[in-house]
Image: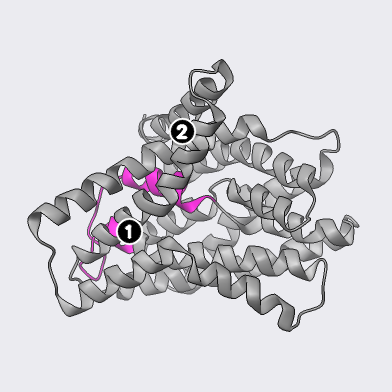
Amino acid sequence: MQILNVLAPVFLMIAIGTVLQRSGFASPTFFKEANRLTYWLGLPALLFSQLAGSFHDVTGARVMLTSMLAATAVVVLIGYAVAWIMRVPGRAMGTFVQGGFRGNLAFVGLPIIYSLPDLPMADGSSTRTAVVLTVAPMMVIYNVGGVVVLLLSQHALGWRMLRPLAKQLATNPPLLATIAGIIFMVEGWTLPSSVDKTFTALGEMALPLGLLGVGASLITVKLGGAWRQPFAAALIKTAVSPAIAYAVGRSFGLSAWELKLVMILMATPTAIISYTVALEMKGDETLASSTIVLSVLGSVVALAFIIGA
């Protein structure tokens, strides 16, 4: 019953977004602007308000973040190894690797964890604060890492890669909101009540609107005829990734609750934005879209197993 209560609202919201787009009730333009609003305003407001309102030690979050970073690095290496074994073409290799590690932390991971009890961590912080402190920098790592692997599949590592990387960092709203929230948290500053309520309200719209956007975006991606490569990438994302996270988290000394949270984040489906990035950077469009669709299906099984364990 707990599995159904946690996962059903998230994936039902995704399904509703798909129906709204498919039926024409909401136009593609609406979802495009809604996603833009969520990314530039709703999600930063959520991250900032969650961090600025917390004054706890963040030792637990640091260990969770370190575990995710280490696990992601291992998954990237596994992605390259599998791509080499499967003889994925050069330009498609970056798309394959990105699909295997770049999870949808903000619009799938956060809603699922927000559906779980907000238990206190070992350091006194809440689950939600610790997860936000983990998710925010990981989103930046995913953004930068996605650009790097796509560029490496087309060019050798060099100075020409610095410009797109710098752009990713300088124009990343979640990163800027995270930095601002941490400053407020460390300095002990407080927002006026009216401003705090405004940020909280904006943050509350981010998750449901983001889930609807994920569902709508699934209509625009196409499942290509060649299934072996996208199936392998989706399997890495939804099965191998949480398994690696379990092994790494155990070695880093995470508690059972912290381990579950990290595994949930690592089992999220491939981020929709990975398709857009692959398209813009001349990756394999069909491989990117097919991986997203298959990873959504795989994540349902993986997340149900993790939450029920």
The image quarter in which residue 85 lies: bottom right
Q: Residue at x 68, y 53 (%)?
A: 99
Q: Is residue 254 visible?
A: no
Q: Which mark is residue 47?
A: 1
The residue furthest left is 193
Q: Residue at x 35, y 67 (%)?
A: 178
Local SS, label 2 = helix
Which quarter of the rendering shows the C terminus?
Answer: top left
| Neighbours of disc 1 within 10 Å: few (<14), some (14-19), many (20+) | many
Q: Residue at x 67, y 48 (%)?
A: 275
Which residue type carries mark 2? Leu
In screen coordinates, is 197 left or right of 238?
Answer: left
Q: Nearer the viewer, residue 179 or 94?
A: 179
Q: Would you say the residues marked 1 and 2 are in contact, meaning their CB atoms lie under 8 Å apart? A: no
Query: Which of the two labelled residues, at mark 1 and mark 2, occupies the earlier sequence position?
Result: 1
For the image, the number of numbered tags is 2
In screen coordinates, is 296 left or right of 126?
Answer: right
Q: Which mark is residue 212?
A: 2
Is 4 in the magenta? no
Local SS, label 1 = helix
Q: Residue at x 39, y 68 (%)?
A: 176
Which residue type carries mark 1? Leu
Bounds of the magenta segment? 104-130
Q: Position of residue 21 (x, y in %)?
A: 54, 24
Residue 138 position (above or below residue 260) = below
Residue 11 position (above or below residue 54) = above
Q: Position of residue 55 (x, y in %)?
A: 17, 70
Alpha-carbon span between mark 1 and mark 2: 19 Å
Q: Nearer the viewer, residue 288 or 262?
A: 288
The image quarter in which residue 278 lies: bottom right
Q: Position of residue 196 (x, y in %)?
A: 16, 55
